[in-house]
Image (cartoon, rainbow, N blue to C red):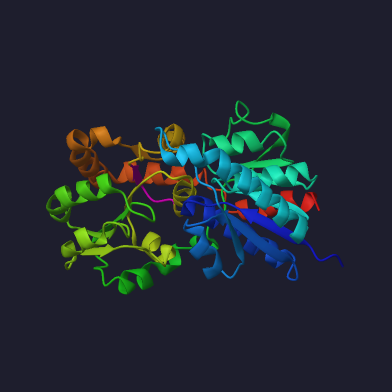
Amino acid sequence: MTKYKFILSGGGTGGHIYPAIAIANELKLQFPDAEFLFVGAKDKMEMQKVPQAGYEIKGLWIAGLQRKLTLQNMMFPLKLATSLLESRRIIKQFKPNVVIGTGGFASGPLLQAAGSAGIPTVVQEQNSFPGITNKLLSKKANAICVAYENLERFFPKEKIVLTGNPVRQDLIDIDSKREEAIAFYGLDPNKKTLLVLGGSLGARRVNQLIEKELQNILSQDVQIIWQCGKLYFEDYKKHNQQNVRVVDFIERMDFVYAAADVIISRAGASSVSELCIVGKPVIFIPSPNVAEDHQTKNAQAIVDVKGAILLKESELESQFSIVFEAMLKDHGKQKQLSDNIKKLAKPNATKDIVNQIIKLL
C-alpha cells in the first residue's frame, strides 16, 4: 500500500491554523501511516499551535504587506523570493502527494512552488470574500473548497466545491453537555447565559462595550462568560464576580457553547461556521480592521437568511442595549434566529474536503 505524504500550510490566525489541523486529523484517520508536514510563517502563532497538535512544522521568512509604506513592505520582495526558494527545497525533500493551503501568507509561496513542480494543490477558502493569496493561488489549484455560495466571481467556477469550513467535531452534540458545562463554570442553571467571543487575541471594541453595559446586562437576570482575549485579560479580569466569568482563552469550546443561551461574537470565518452548527441566537459585531472587510461580509451572509443580528462597531453606542434587550425578551425571535442559522451548518465539511484531496491521489 502506498504511504502518502501531505503538506499543509495556513497561518497567521486561528482561522487559518485550526482548519488545517482539522484536515490533517481527518486525513490521518483515513491514512494512519501517512506522513504530514506543516509550513507556516516564522514568529506566527502556528509555530506553537501546530506542534501542540502533534505535527511537525517548518517556518518561512514571510509576512503580509502592510497598508502603509513601511520597512516591512520594502523587505517584502526579498522575503517572497527567499520563501519561494525555501518552499521549493521543502517540496523537493519531502515529496508530497498533495499540498493543501488554508490561507495566510505562508501558503502563497508554498502552493506556488508545489504547482510549479506539478504537485496537485487544494485551496480551502474560509471566507465569503477571499484574500489576495487564495485568489492568486486558485488559478493553478486543482480544487477550491469553499464555505459560501457565489464565489465564481473570484475563482474558476469548474474548480469550486461547496464543502463548508472544518469545525471541531466535539461541537456536533453540545445539547447533552449543558449540565456539565454549567457546573464547570460554576453558573446558575436557572439564569440565561450570555457568551461573549472576541477571537483568540481578543476584540478591544467588544471588551469596551461589555464593560460599559455590564450592569445593564446583569440587571436582566443574565450571567456572562466573557472571553476577552490574551491581550486584554489583565485589564478586564477585575470584573470576575459571581455572575461574570472573565477568561483569556477557551480550551473547551464545546462547554461554552453548551452553556450559552445567547452569543455575541466577531465574524471570523471559523467562528461563523461553528455558530451555524451550534445554532444559538447570535449578535455579530464584525471587526472593521480586516482585509476587504470580510467579517462584515461573512456576517451579512447569515443575516440575509434571517439567521443572526449584525451590529457594526459604529452602531454600538446607539443600538446595542435596545437590540440586546429586545432579543432577550422575544423568544419567537430567538427561535427564528436559531432555526435559520442551523440550516447553514455543514457538519461534514472536513470529510468532504478530505474526499476532494483523496480524488487527487
Number of numbered labels in the structure image: 0
Figure quadrant of the N terminus: bottom right
Q: Compared with residue 352, is residue 132 higher up or lower down, i.e. above or below?
A: above
Q: Check residue 77 for magenta coloring.
A: no
Q: Residue at x 49, y 48 (%)?
A: 273
Q: Compared with residue 17, is residue 125 higher up or lower down, i.e. above or below?
A: above
Q: Residue at x 19, y 65 (%)?
A: 240
Q: Is residue 308 visible?
A: yes
Q: Compared with residue 249, is residue 326 higher up or lower down, i.e. above or below?
A: above
> Magenta segment, which residues?
279-284
Q: Give how far across and how far down residue 51 sits, in percent.
A: 55, 68
Q: Residue at x 61, y 56 (%)?
A: 39
Q: Residue at x 64, y 31 (%)?
A: 155
Q: Residue furthest right?
A: 1
Compared across the picture, whether 357 is left or right of 183 comes to right
Q: Is residue 96 visible?
A: no
Q: Give how far across and how far down residue 298 sits, in percent.
A: 45, 38
Q: Closest to the observer: 60 or 138?
A: 60
Q: Give how far across and how far down residue 8 sits, in percent.
A: 64, 55
Compared across the picture, whether 237 is left or right of 215 comes to right
